[in-house]
Amino acid sequence: MPRLLLVRHAATVGANGRYWGRTDHPLSQAGLAQARRIAGRLATEPAVAVHSSDRLRARATAACLAPGLPAIVHPDLRELDFGYLEGLTWQEAARLYPQSEEFWSCRRLDVSLPGGESIADLFARVGRFLAEVREGPEDQALLVVAHGGSLRALICLCLGLPPASLWKLKLDHASLTVLDLGHEGPILRLLNDTCHLQP
């Protein structure tokens, strides 16, 4: 079973504290600088394959991180679909769609955001991706570039954490998380490391 190098995509144009899932924003200039910095960091941990969400911000980040390796694109690694909350701030969403509180509480995993996905939907598709890659050789490192929601779901699935743990994990833009999926069981070696972004 391989080592997973998980990278959240770098900062995008128009991030500004709003829910962005299916909207395909490009990387900002700051995001491109972040991607170059983490590329330098990963030079000491070469990957044999790159897996990326099909969203532009993930693919652009992946292209910076491993220019010699074409990314294997996975729609299953997309960010959570926020439905009608897309583009809204937290305050706007709470006012316009108060029924979405049941979704955020994770009391029922089958409850969808208005016009969007449920937690069960997110975990099901990320689980499909994990099933594809987890049988690889143990000495391989796979680079996975995706989004805050899908990567947190992937961490929960690997470690056997309940879905409600999704909201207890923080992943910053251009952060690195390392998971070993060895035969002795998954080991979280690094979480949300951003030391490469420091001046």
Image (cartoon, helix red, strand yellow):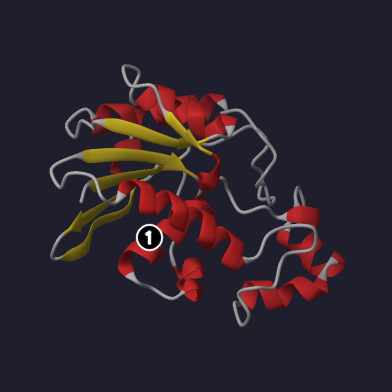
Where residue 12 appears, as percent x and y from the top left, is 58, 34
Q: Residue drawn at (73%, 57%), measured in percent from left and top?
A: 116
Q: Is residue 39 above or below residue 77?
A: above
Q: Is residue 182 left or right of residue 156?
A: left
Q: Is residue 98 above or below residue 142?
A: below
Where residue 173 appears, as percent x and y from the top left, is 47, 43
Q: Residue drawn at (53%, 46%), measured in percent from left and top?
A: 76
Q: In which quadrant of the rendered view does residue 127 lie?
A: bottom left
Q: Can I make out residue 162 in this image? A: yes
Q: Is residue 84 above or below residue 31?
A: below
Q: Which residue is mark 1?
A: 155
- Quarter of the picture containing the C terminus is top left
Where residue 67 appears, as percent x and y from the top left, is 35, 18
Q: Is residue 199 left or right of residue 13?
A: left
Where residue 14 appears, as percent x and y from the top left, is 68, 36
Hey, what amino acid is under mark 1? Ile
Residue nearest the observer in this picture, 99 or 136: 136
Residue nearest the observer in this picture, 195 or 1: 1
Q: In which quadrant of the rendered view does residue 99 lie?
A: bottom right
Q: Residues within 10 Å of mark 1 (few under 14, many from 20)?
A: many
